[in-house]
């Protein structure tokens, strides 16, 4: 899944922007709020939404990393571009976590658009756990 940064820019999947620490901070805060909301959804047994919001936490954390480092996704492939950027920015040691990020991207689509069969409690809880790990990794990179 990981493509070079220059390839992502060349194919206009992401673009260079001025680094924006304030935007990165706001997005990181939103990612944290989303993670808390996902936990609330799990407690309420709204399992599909727990997974979808966990994914949104990962997406927003990825956007925070992009803002901090001076990149932003193109509009036509927004979600995929963030996953691909994170694969590059977080490196090979994080490849399993980035693969989960992409898997939750696909599953979130199914949940939001009514195509998901169902989301089990273990799957929703795992999504929250991995979103927390992803957020912690991004926060470390933002520091």
Image (tube, helix red, strand yellow):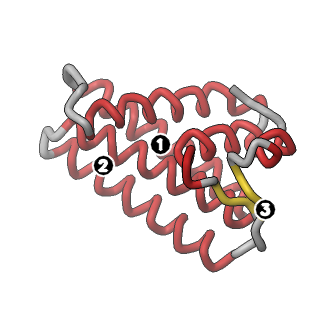
**Residue at x 42% of width, y 29% of height:** 106
Q: Is residue 127 left or right of residue 83?
A: left
Q: Label 3, secondary structure: give it.
A: strand
Please give the label number shown on residue 38.
Answer: 2
- The mark closer to the camera, 3 or 2, is 3
Total marks placed: 3
According to the picture, the residue beneath numbered tag 1 turns out to be: 131
Is any part of residue 120 visible from this angle? no
Q: CA distance from mark 3 to mark 1?
A: 26 Å
* Residue 70 locus on image (x, y percent): 77, 65
Q: Earlier in the sequence, mark 3 or mark 1?
A: 3
Q: Classify mark 1: residues with Cα within 10 Å, few (<14), some (14-19) or many (20+).
A: many
According to the picture, the residue beneath numbered tag 3 turns out to be: 16
Q: Classify mark 2: residues with Cα within 10 Å, few (<14), some (14-19) or many (20+).
A: many
Judged from this view, the residue extending furthest toward the bottom is: 22
**Residue at x 24% of width, y 42% of height:** 49
Is 122 situated above or below 125? above
Q: Classify mark 3: residues with Cα within 10 Å, few (<14), some (14-19) or many (20+).
A: some
Q: Label 1, secondary structure: give it.
A: helix
Q: CA distance from mark 3 to mark 2?
A: 31 Å
50 and 85: which is toward the camera: 85
**Residue at x 75% of width, y 68% of height:** 17
Q: Label 2, secondary structure: give it.
A: helix
């Amino acid at each position: 899944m990981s493509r070079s940064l220059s390839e992502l820019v060349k194919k206009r999947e992401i673009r260079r922007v001025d680094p924006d620490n304030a935007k990165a901070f706001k997005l990181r805060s939103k990612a944290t709020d989303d993670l808390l909301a996902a936990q609330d959804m799990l407690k309420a047994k709204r399992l599909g939404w727990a997974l979808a919001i966990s994914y949104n936490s990962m997406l927003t954390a990825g956007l925070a990393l992009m803002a901090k480092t001076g990149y932003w996704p193109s509009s036509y492939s927004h979600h995929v571009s963030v996953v691909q950027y994170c694969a590059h920015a977080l490196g090979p040691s994080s490849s399993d976590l980035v693969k989960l990020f992409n898997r939750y991207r696909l599953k979130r689509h199914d949940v939001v658009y009514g195509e998901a069969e169902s989301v089990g409690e273990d799957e929703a809880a795992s999504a929250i756990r991995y979103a927390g790990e992803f957020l912690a990794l991004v926060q470390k990179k933002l520091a």
